[in-house]
Amino acid sequence: MYVSPIREPLIRGNKNYSQVTKDILSPMAGKPSKYWYMGIALAGAAALMGAWASYETVFNGIGTWGLNKTIGWAWDITNFVWWVGIGHAGTFISAILLLFRQKWRTSINRSAEAMTLIAIACAGFFPLIHMGRLLLGFFIFPYPNTRDLWVNFNSPLLWDVFAISTYFAVSLIFWYVGLIPDIGTVRDKATNKIRKAIYGFLSFGWTGSARHWSRHETISLVLAGLAAPLVLSVHTIVSFDFATSVIPGWHTTIFPPYFVSGAIFSGFAMVLTLLIVARKALHLEDYITVNHIESMNKIIILTGSIVGIAYLTEFFMAWYSGVEYETYAFFNRAFGPYAWAYWIMMTCNVITPQLFWFKKIRTSLVATFIISIFVNIGMWFERFVIVVTSLHRDYLPSSWTMYKPTLVEVGLYVGTLGLFFTLFLLFIRVFPVIAIAEVKSVLKSSGENQKHAHHE
Amino acid sequence: MEKKYYRSLEELTINPDQIQDHEMLGDKKSLLALEQEAKKNNEPNRRDFLKLFGFTVASAAVVASCEQPVRKAIPYLIQPEEIVPGKASYYASTFFDGTDYCSILVKVRDGRPIKIEGNKLSAITGGGTSARAQASVLNLYDNYRYTKPLVQGEEASWSEMDRQITDKLEAISAKGGKIVMLTPTIISPSTKAVIAAFSEKYPTTSHIQYDNVSASGIRKANEISFGEAFVPSYHFDKAKLIVSFDADFLGTWLSPVEFTRQYISNRKLHEGKTTMSRHIHLEGGMSLTGSNADKRIALKPSQQKAAIAQLYLALIQQSSQNGPVAEMPAIANELLDAKGTSLVVCNSNDHETQLIVNAINQLLGNYENTTNTQVHLKVRQGNDQVMAKLIDELNAGLVDGIILYDVNPVYDYPESDKVISGLQKASLKISMPVLREETSSYVDFVCPDHHFLESWNDFEVKTGHYTFAQPAIRPIFNTRSAQESLLKWAGKEKDFRLFIQEYWEKNLFPASGYLSFTAFWNEKIHDGIYDSGIIDPKPLVYIDTDIEGLVGKASVLTASDIDLDLYYNISVGNGKHANNPWLQELPDPITKICWDNYAAVSQKLADEYGLKDEDLITINQTGPYPVIIQPGQEHHTVSLALGYGREKSGKSSEGIGVNAYPLVKMEDGSRHLQTAGVVINKVAGNYRLARTQTHHSMEGREIVRDTTLQEYLVKPNSGNEVREEIKKHLKSIYPKKTYDGFHWGMAIDLNSCIGCNACIVACSAENNVPVVGKEQVLMAREMHWIRIDRYYKGDPDNPELIRQPVMCQHCDNAPCENVCPVAATTHSNEGINQMAYNRCIGTRYCNNNCPYKVRRFNFFDYTNADSFQGNLYDPAEMTVDLRKLVLNPDVTTRAKGVIEKCSFCIQRIQDTKLTAKIENRELVDGEVVTACAQACPSQAIVFGNLNDTESRVAKMFADERNYHVLEELHVLPSVGYLTKVKNTNV
């Protein structure tokens, strides 16, 4: 495919195919660095804290959290939505950008998809742990039983079950299908017998024949077609948890598009956070270039602005609707006891991404890293604001209460962060963090040497 | 035709001969023979052995690993005639704790009392109850009760104890030593006869009645005004204008359940009534009664006497401008307009104050109209001065023997040290307590009395009005009725029941008009009530006293900076029943605080002393007491509840709050709850108070709708105009759901609800609602299925207080139902929003989506119903075996992680429906009564079938005052509220 020579190259350095393979497989070779060990020890410790918090929750009860008679959800659902949102970038990159033929996605899709899977796993943990009777959680599946009990298909929470599990399944298959040629490469490069056997098994007998490639391309497209609507549907359905309720601040028709763009927004921020560190640590600067970062930053400006407009629209509607409860709910968000959370959200999500209009900031790794962290924080607070500040003062002032998290709730959140980083660190040791085959496919058209060849 | 049984369709269609062929197989061998043959051929071999061995080991392992505790339910060998398992029996009885009186029915299931209900036959309480009466059944199962007689703290047998006591009594009697029988007010004629019999045996005995809530002032004033120390019978129902000086007659004053019933009968507006009484209340702190008043004036306790004098002067048309209350001339004019139909009451224990009140009532012609001197209210007969004298005598060593029956002066006498030192000087000290208490640790002999639900007794609460108590359970412990103990010591070996019967046969039966005593007795015991109709032949004559002199003296204002106003709250009252988790967790109707007492101060005083909520202060160097800022509090008055800070009474009361009895002022031997000029000091630190409602403004929302009588008369839907507007917008694309048969609904008259909390305790008892303790209430996790919201309105200095009972609204378009992923909460075909606990997985989505926030989540294992062991959370000890006896077997206890909420007492609905079905008739309106409605002394709650247009609830729904909270959400609630109407008289 023709690519204009004046476009910046997607892969830097005069690479040939063999170098690409070598570069990308290098993080998997040899012993891990001491930073990797430190990282996994820290992440593992955090995950253990999550295990303790889970035990407390299941054994002693939800009472170990800070919830009360009025506030039935707080950090649990905040974390759930946050993690689901983070998961969105991977699918967006690999499916929607694939369909739009965005070549720059090739350098980042693999790790973004891995992040998606891990994030969904972390997300899925919260609806489970938030159940008062986890051991009976299987009631939520519509399985045939002798008591003729059936689930309630009117409940958005049930829709969540299907949405999240479908999303996880499709993402997993998509990711794995993309991995097969690369696993073949890993197998071929392996010197150790056991390693060869394992990767040989995992590669499903990939030989790289034209037929294999043809089928691989086809299935990738089909899965992309399947995954693309999921990007939109999953967070839409998650937003239904709130939108279909009667609680002021939740009952809002704007939620589906607002949630989806927020999800992509936060997802990209998390991809940036991870990759800015990973490209440095794994010496992949030539593959994940400032160009890639800049492209992602542009998506952040777009989605961040959509989110900002959504916030303003909510406020406008709260006033324009003339519903006193709705008006109060939004007034309370901005000026009530949880105003600090609201203003953190506004600052992090609406103001900081706008800095990316400056090319200097958008192309600065340090600035991008800092802003990506801001967005991660801001998006967490967005969910906190929606969940907690809407609930804590709803219709009858007699029941208004305040909420404060407990160590157990913090532990659960820290635990999922620990799980997330543990799995991510394992991932970079086990699979190529960049899709080798896909990068190779753009090397000819967008590699630096090709560009030079044209110039000369 | 011969009946034909068949096992399968085949068998039915095939003729018998063929069946024969089926059973006889092959060469005509029967199945049995074949089986035996097969057995013979199948001698056990190695494989079978291994199979069996494997199976046995596996099943043994399985069985051993799922060990279930064996619980035995042993049926009656001989079924008692009146007991049907699973069916409740009701026994008429009486709740009287020395101060509060209630005629009750005791609900007994399988031999154990589980619930108190009001006795509708009572002319006094009319089926109403109080929170304390409702909660009294739990005291029966108090795990701190005395379980056996104790001699010097050691277990002893009754006979041994009787021998020792009788010896000592006789020795004292022989030397002419003084014996004192100290009791609370005794309104039981038979008990009085028992005491008389005891005094006959030991002639040096004197009987002293000691009330920790005393009406000494009233009695003494009446002795001067009428020549007889008594408390008259009040008729709030006949009063068109009530002026109360700090008398909390709806909450704690004299006979609150009776007064509530009377008061409300004159304030209900539906069913065609267009008049209601007017109520003016002058008080220092905000009381339950004050919060219900049409006009409430904050009055410093030290100025109360002057204010009453001012009223007197205003009434006799003298200058009254200089008194403490600016509105007094207007009040006097209103009173003069309502001559003969007004009532002025005052709680003061100062007899001079009460004398002026008497003079005012006399002046207004209220005697024999709204105050009846022919019928005496027999509660609070104690005389403070006599008690004070006794304490002095004890300390002087003049008393040799003292019998303390159901009194606890070590705790509730202001000068507790004197009581203790005095007791030590007596050579014989006997106590007869029911619940564990402080005084009994200072006596030689503890002779535990039965709980009233285990005993026989009779009561005469008003002249000629008798009620009974009968045992509803065999005594749980090795206790003995106090009367029987006294009879025994008096040398009369007699069962108290027989004693009562004989007493009645001799004294009351002759005038009853019955032919046989058995018929008389059986009928009265069944009803629990006997109204003899015999009252004092003629009203007492008012004797003029030097009122002018008193008024002149009273008009001189006492200068004081800060006044102390002690009061009894409606939950623990005088503290006798403090060890009752239901009562401790009951939020105060004004402050919504539970599990503590606290010093209520005004915003102004708080500003002066730099106080904020939960700071600590000392009062006259006692305390420290936590502070709350109370709207409507008189600027320089500090209010503090008595009844807390128990020391030896059990876990739910020990160390809960601070004992304020030492602050009760003793003056001329009288107990005064109000003290002028106390010193308060802020001290370092703070103390967290558990409050069930922390936001106090309605935020301008139309939640509790109210109006004034004057506006109501012009426009019946005044205050409720918004409803018309809302109804116009209630449209749905779905057809309106209809219900065949029943459509249950509940109407609540906000004008009748006084906020007494009886419904909350009744609901807890009926539905096994867990008690969660202070820490959980601090986390806003109380479990009450019904709550009473209260909001302040208007001027924070003297706000209006409005309240609203809120329970599940049983929405016909319920937002909770559609969000539950597992359909654990669904709608019944009778319009009830149901909760299937077994199906609930605890997502709490329903709770979030409930606009009324009435759903409650079991955050911990409060009930020991969880599948894990070792995670019980029960700070109030509600799951100890003894307390568990109070559980209602018709309602399941809920496990950890499950949502629960009001069920409209579905078990009562089902029970009543079944009864009607068995009796082959239709349900009658009013037959199904929810626990809250049953308990309500003002009948504010009406339950019934909305499909029946003639039902009371349907009529109330049709009233123009009716509205639904948050009706604009189109959730279609089944609970309606009638607007609150105040009589502002302008």
Image: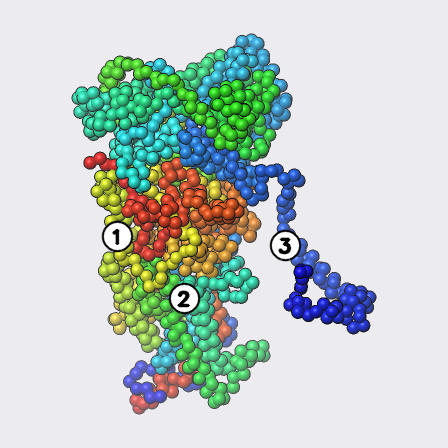
Determine which quarter of the picture holds residue A217.
bottom left
Question: On residue A84, which mark appears?
Answer: 2
Please tell me whether mark 2 or mark 3 is closer to you in this view.
3
Q: Earlier in the sequence, mark 3 or mark 1?
A: 3
Chain letter of mark 2 equals A
- Where does residue A102 sit, x and y in percent of width and height? 35, 80
User: Percent from the top left, x then y, of residue B952?
Assistant: 37, 44
Disc 1 to disc 2: CB gap under 8 Å? no
**Badge 3 is on which residue?**
B66
Label 3, label 1: how many angstroms apart (C-alpha)?
62 Å
Question: Label 3: chain?
Answer: B
* Secondary structure category for the residue under label 2: helix
Local SS, label 3? loop
Q: Are marks 2 and 3 on the same chain?
A: no
- View extreme (top): residue: B175
A253 w.r.t. B961: above or below: below
Judge whether B964 appears above or below B467 on screen.
below
Tell which of B525 and B683 is nearer to you.
Answer: B525
Residue drawn at x 32%, y 16% as measured from the top left: B541
Report whether residue B844 is seen: no
User: Residue B441 placed where, x, y %?
Assistant: 53, 25
- The label on residue B724 is 1
User: B752 or B464: nearer the eye?
Assistant: B464
Q: Chain of mark 1?
A: B
Q: Which amino acid type is shown beneath numbered disc 3?
A: Cys
